[in-house]
């Protein structure tokens, strides 16, 4: 397994202590967290950074920090996690989150494509899933650019969101490995 992936413009890497300040600022931004249950405290951001770091150390994969190679700027994360056990489906989910200043540059799609290649290559996944709130059209667009498909019959109520929350209505996208191992 690896603790870093590279694209033309991005480095997906293990988390550093120096990522905490921009990570916490990003998670305090209500627009960044609009479909994720609201802003996080610095302590919550620190806990998630440590969890992501541990998962990469333990499994060799997870949610990597995303850095722009030309500037060294930390702009968010991309990677994988196992689907929460409370969800109505199982598998490995791809995800990304970027600072608002990084929106509109294609970084989400570029970093997610690197993750898909790694997931279907070295990880040998048969399928990659993606979940988003029904209203999160920016993430839906990234999922479609990755070639993921959405079946409205699989839309669901996210059990991790409180009843009545607009984020509770969720969609599931799927992408099958075009070259599954035999």
Image (cartoon, rainbow, N blue to C red):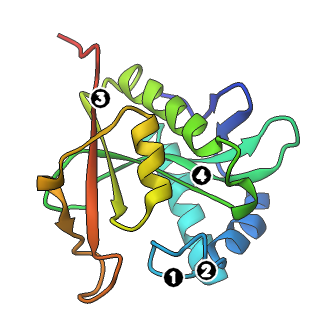
User: Residue 125 got which mark?
Assistant: 3
Q: Label 1 neighbourhood size at 10 Å, few (<14), some (14-19), many (20+)?
A: few
The local secondary structure at tag 1 comes to loop
Viewer-nearest residue: 35 or 60? 35
Q: Position of residue 157 (x, y in %)?
A: 19, 72
Identify residue for label 2: 30
Residue at left 59%, top 35%?
110
Identify residue for label 4: 77
The numbered mark, 3 or 2, whose residue comes first in the sequence reads 2
Q: Nearer the viewer, mark 1 or mark 3?
A: 1
Quote the CA–CA distance across marks 4 and 2: 17 Å
Q: Position of residue 70 (x, y in %)?
A: 86, 35
Q: Nearer the viewer, mark 1 or mark 4?
A: 1
**In this view, 136 is above or below 38:** above
Quote the CA–CA distance across marks 1 and 3: 31 Å
Question: Most extreme residue toward the bottom, as rendered?
Answer: 164
Q: Quadrant of the C terminus?
A: top left
**In this view, 168 is above or below 103:** below
104 sits to left or right of 73: left
The numbered mark, 1 or 2, whose residue comes first in the sequence reads 2
Q: Position of residue 25 (x, y in %)?
A: 73, 73
The numbered mark, 4 or 3, whose residue comes first in the sequence reads 4
Are discs 1 and 2 less than 8 Å apart at CB? Answer: yes
The local secondary structure at tag 3 comes to loop
């Amino acid at each position: 397994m690896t603790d870093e992936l590279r694209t033309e413009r991005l480095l997906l890497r293990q988390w550093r202590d120096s990522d905490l300040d921009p990570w916490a600022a990003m998670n305090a931004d209500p627009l960044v967290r609009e479909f994720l249950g609201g802003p996080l405290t610095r302590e919550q951001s620190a806990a998630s950074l440590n969890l992501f770091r541990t998962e990469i150390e333990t499994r060799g994969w997870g949610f990597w920090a995303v850095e722009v190679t030309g500037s060294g700027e930390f702009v968010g994360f991309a990677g994988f996690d196992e689907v929460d056990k409370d969800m109505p489906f199982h598998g490995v989910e791809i995800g990304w989150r970027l600072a608002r200043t990084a929106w509109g540059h294609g970084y989400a799609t570029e970093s997610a494509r690197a993750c898909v290649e790694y997931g279907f290559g070295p990880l040998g996944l048969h399928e990659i899933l993606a979940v988003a709130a029904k209203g999160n059209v920016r993430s839906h667009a990234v999922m479609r650019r990755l070639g993921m498909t959405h079946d409205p019959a699989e839309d669901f109520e996210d059990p991790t969101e409180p009843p009545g929350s607009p984020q509770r209505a969720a969609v599931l996208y799927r992408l099958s490995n075009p070259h599954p191992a035999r």
